[in-house]
Amino acid sequence: MEQYSMKNPFPATVVGVRPITKPGSAKETNHIDLSLEGSGLEYSAGDALGVQPMNDPELADALIAALGLDPQETVALPTGAVAPLREALITTYDITTIKKSVLVKWNAVANSAKLNAYIEDAEQLREFAHGRDILDLAQDPETAARFENATQFVGCLGKLSPRLYSIASSPDAVPGQVSLCVGAVRYTPKHSERPRKGVCSTYLADRVKPGDKVRVFVQPKPGFRLPDDGSTPIIMVGPGAGIAPFRAFWQQRVADKATGPMWFFFGNPHQATDACYEDELAELVASGAMRVSEAWSRDQDHKVYVQHLMEQNAEEIWKWLRAGAVFYVCGDAMRMAKDVQAALLNIISTQGKHSPEEAVGYLAAMRDAKQYRKDVY
């Protein structure tokens, strides 16, 4: 059987795509089911799925028009094959990320004083690149470049990279399939009125239909696994699309008939529009298999996040930890995960009668013992 991997993704058939948040949600989240039949790919709860996306055809068309190039002109691909420019921009080249390496090559043609300043200052480049794509360069008179041909243009571009998503299913719950839970990224940057879209999240949300093929591979995450002993308690913190690996966890524990208690902390802006997998969660709560604490941050005058619920339940969380519970967190590394870790350190300090320094050491020991595990991005 052919070996599928990141270098050779499997063309998985789309079984279904459905929203799990409701219309009007500012946190539009979609559930995607893909068939792995015939792939030989195997995964465990906690692993990630790599998805090779495609760029938005409308963005590719606008870029080609702005550069005055022929969409049917043949260009080389990194694999050594060739394809028409339009196809290459949709399937192969990165047209949404501005890196220093891209700017250096672009500016060899554009000769822009403005871009020279950004190339020479990493902090300015970081600010300039945020929310900008290659079309912005092409449309700005101060940064525009006139390429002799399509080959010269694609020589500036990097390769379109796969995106990794935490798998939202257990292989024992849905044999031959894999599920994803993906938040669609859509925003309008400060510098432009042109709306922006997450490359892969909106590829899956807007353009992928049942029966289509999506190229995927499994990315193992051995550091983010359920405990071997099914009687071990687990605490899971996963607001928004961070719910994904924990759906895999609870499905796996149900399939294993595991006896260990589960406690899930979930958060999103509004309960009316932003609840995810609410029927599954209600069934688990009703059966006594899992405890769920939910933070709806915008449903009251003051904002309530998962870390606030942790603080409200500090005494009981400490009891679970002392009983050997494994603590998991999944989601945004820059803000949420830091706030959750700060809340956890505070619980260790106040409930365990430890100094702040001792609490840091205690958490480090938990990490070493695999009692504290993170899947953050």
Image: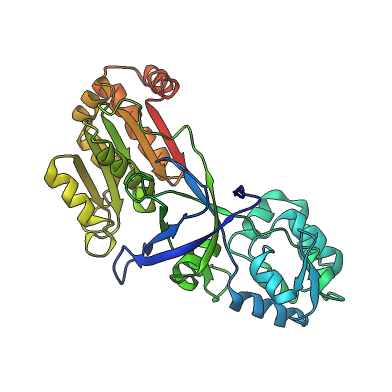
In this rendering, the answer to whether 139 lies above or below 273 is below
Q: Nearer the viewer, residue 126 or 152?
A: 152
Q: Is residue 166 left or right of residue 249?
A: right
Coloration of the structure image: rainbow
Image point (80%, 71%), residue name: 75
Quarter of the rendering containing residue 343:
top left
Image point (12%, 46%), residue name: 286
Quarter of the rendering containing residue 115:
bottom right
- Residue 348 x/y as whole percent: 30, 24
Number of residue marks: 0
- Residue 50 x/y as whole percent: 54, 51
Q: Nearer the viewer, residue 291 or 360?
A: 291
Visible residue check, residue 103:
yes
Image point (64%, 70%), residue name: 90
Quarter of the rendering containing residue 27:
bottom left
Q: Is residue 104 left or right of residue 9?
A: right
